[in-house]
Amino acid sequence: MRRGEAWHRSACAAALALGLACATGGSDHSAVAAGDARGARGSRSQKVRTEPGLPADATLTRDPETGTVRFLRGPDLSRELDADPAFRAARAAGDAEGVARAFLQRYAEPLRLDDPRAELALQRIDVDRIGSTHVRFEQRHRGLPIPGAGLIVHLDRERRVNLVSGSYVATPRDVAAEPALSADAARAAAGDCAACAADLVVFAERGRDARLAWRVAPPAERIAGEVLTVDAKSGEVLRREPVSIPGRRSNPEGGGR
């Protein structure tokens, strides 16, 4: 199998794993976006061939509002790291997380992340039926989760990076380090639910500055209710998410950012 065909099959598998359609037209070996990993923010993306600091044959799609990377594609995006002994060792050992983290750290600036190593927590690693590996990361800020935000690094069978996808935010700025609102006050804002869990998160939504917030969730045994995100400074309810499955809470990502 020719290398281009192998890359196309790998990219298609990655695309299907993300809910994308994969199409070929003549020599066009590209995964055609029908959505993204998280339904991503529902706006048109800006697609360019490449940018300074990225591999010359990369195809880049940025979110037009946030400027973050939605898709970065290419047959071997990680080839510039082949001179790095640590990267080569990770590839040889089959260390998919190590390969992915080395790539993200190398391209932190175009990804608009200050320190991917600290800002991205491993969620899981999936291997598909053709041997491609998908390394999923959740985004965090100062150790706190940013609900719904994350990146996926896709590797081919030779553990080369050929696709990066996701819906995330640039490293947040000016987020309060401590909440002005107590957990009990957040529960009161959510309807005086003394039994509710209240956890600190960083709330980042399109068109709004990132901010510290409380995520207030009803007890797991409750069969109805809402998960509320409450501003940790003002007490404003920023988001409501219905609990839709008995005994379980709805996905905080709401099916997509």
Image (cartoon, rainbow, N blue to C red):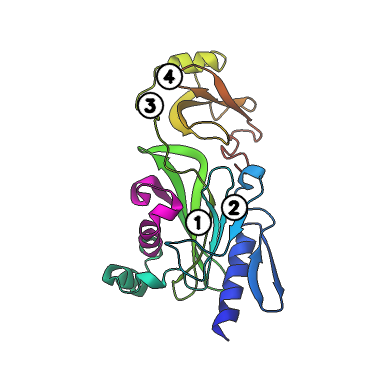
Q: Do the numbered discs 3 and 4 sit on residues whose CB atoms are within 8 Å? A: no
Q: Do the numbered discs 2 and 4 sit on residues whose CB atoms are within 8 Å? A: no
- Helix, strand or loop under label 2: loop
- The Cα atoms of the two marked residues, 1 and 2, are separated by 8 Å
Badge 3: residue crowd in 10 Å (few <14, some 14–19, many ≥20) = some
Q: Residue at x 51, y 49 (%)?
A: 68
Give the residue at mark 2.
Answer: 37
Q: Residue at x 58, y 69 (%)?
A: 11
Residue range (magenta): 99-122
Question: What amino acid type is highlighted by mark number 2?
Answer: Ala
Q: Position of residue 143 (x, y in %)?
A: 36, 38
Question: What amino acid type is highlighted by mark number 1?
Answer: Ile
Give the residue at mark 3.
Answer: 176
Above or below, 45 against 100 in this view is: above
Give the residue at mark 4.
Answer: 183
Mark 3 / mark 4, whichever is N-terminal: 3
- The Cα atoms of the two marked residues, 1 and 4, are separated by 32 Å
* Picture mark count: 4
Question: What amino acid type is highlighted by mark number 3?
Answer: Ala
Q: Do the numbered discs 1 and 2 sit on residues whose CB atoms are within 8 Å? A: yes
Question: What amino acid type is highlighted by mark number 4?
Answer: Ala
**Depth check, front residue: 50 or 143:** 50
Badge 1: residue crowd in 10 Å (few <14, some 14–19, many ≥20) = many
Mark 3 / mark 1, whichever is N-terminal: 1
